Amino acid sequence: MLLHPSPCLSRQQEPQTADRSVEQLIGELIAATACLFAQGLGECWARGKMNGQMSADTKEQGSVLIAGLLELRNGTAGELDFNAVARSHGARVLKDRYGQGVSDKTLNSLLNAALEVLDRIIRARLN
């Protein structure tokens, strides 16, 4: 597995305060989503082959995270470049958690995958 999601998902959440920026929230949510994608890939590649069996818990957590990202994206429409903020702040969150143990290429791939899913959902809702 590329990243172990436990530190992202089970880490105690900081209380939400007024000084916590939207950019930080976007970064934390996209980082958690990237970790969950890594977990989902691990579940799908069980026993060395792709069998497509992702746990119900992973799917449910993914739904919750994507819903939060959609809410933030909609709430910041026209105010900031959501994808750029998600990439930069998400990468910072993941680097803070995992240090140099994970390559930039891996982090970018996971963040891009999360943003691709978000974009697909948005396009599907528009059609």
Image: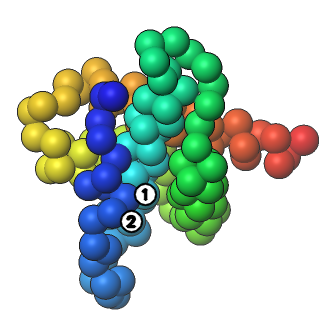
- Relative to 118, does residue 53 appear above or below in the rendering? above
Q: Based on the displayed image, in which of its 4 quarters is residue 105 positioned? A: top left
Q: Is residue 92 visible?
A: no
Residue 84 placed where, x, y %?
41, 43
Q: Please state if 124 lies on the left or on the right of 93 as rendered.
A: right
Disc 2 residue crowd, few under 14, some 14–19, many 20+, Cα 10 Å: some
Q: Is residue 40 visible?
A: yes
Q: Which residue is mark 1?
A: 29
Front-lying residue, 41 or 117: 41
Q: Is residue 98 above or below residue 17?
A: above
The residue under label 2 is 25
Secondary structure at badge 1 equals helix
Front position in the image: 79 or 23: 23
* Vertical position of residue 28 compared to residue 42: above or below: below
Query: Disc 2 and disc 1: Cα gap in Å?
Result: 6 Å
* Residue farthest along the left direction in this orientation: 100
State the image coordinates of residue 65 (x, y, percent, origin top left).
54, 57
In depth, the one of 53 and 19 nearer the eye is 53
- Amino acid on which disc 1 is placed: Leu
| Secondary structure category for the residue under label 2 | helix
Q: Label 2 is placed on what type of residue?
A: Leu
Q: Along the horizontal axis of the image, is 62 left or right of 109?
A: right
Q: Nearer the viewer, mark 2 or mark 1?
A: 1
Of 64 and 108, the residue lying toward us? 64
Query: Which residue is at 77% across, 40% downward?
Result: 123
The structure residue drawn at horizontal position 26% and vertical position 55%, both measured from the top left corner, is 7
Q: Are marks 2 and 1 in contact (CB under 8 Å)?
A: yes
Residue 114, how many percent across, how many down?
51, 39
Residue 4, quarter of picture? top left
Coloration of the structure image: rainbow
Locate residue 122, reporting x and y percent. 73, 46
Residue sitting farthest toward the front: 47
